[in-house]
Image (tube, rainbow, N blue to C red):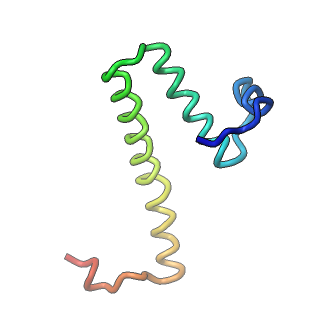
Amino acid sequence: MPYITMERRVELANGAAVSTPGELNFALTAQCIDYLLFKGLSYQAINDVVGALEGAKLEFYRRIAVPYESKKIGLNGDVYPAQAVEQ
C-alpha cells in the first residue's frame, strides 16, 4: 500500500485526478475500504471486494491489454514461434 501524503489523500477524496500508480492504488484501496465499512466486515463483504477487483482486472486486461499487445505484435513481430501458439 503506497502511503501518499495526507494532503494528497484529501485532494483525491475531494475529486482530484489520480496521477501516479501509488495514487491509483490508494484510490482503489480507499473504495474497497469504504465498501467494507458500509457492508460491515464479513467473509461475504471481503469476497465481494476480491471478486469485484478480480473481475475488473480481467475485464481491463481483456478490453485494454489484449488489443494493445495484439497491435504491438503486428508492429514488432511475435516473440512466440507460430507452432507454439497454433492448435
How far from the left and from the top, in percent, is residue 28? Answer: 56, 35
* Nearest to the observer: residue 76 or residue 55: 55
Q: Can you say which quadrant of the picture contains the N terminus? A: top right
How far from the left and from the top, in percent, is residue 59? Answer: 41, 46
The number of callouts visible is: 0
Outermost left residue? 87
What residue lies at 71% left-to-right and 38% top-to-bottom?
Answer: 4
How far from the left and from the top, in percent, is residue 60? Answer: 46, 48
What residue lies at 80% left-to-right and 30% top-to-bottom?
Answer: 7
In the picture, measured across the screen, residue 33 lies left or right of residue 8, that is left
44 relative to 29, above or below: above
What residue lies at 33% left-to-right and 86% top-to-bottom?
Answer: 81
In the picture, measured across the screen, residue 10 lies left or right of residue 58, that is right
* Nearest to the observer: residue 11 or residue 73: 11
30 relative to 58, above or below: above
Q: Can you say which quadrant of the picture contains the C terminus? A: bottom left
75 relative to 53, above or below: below
What residue lies at 49% left-to-right and 54% top-to-bottom?
Answer: 64
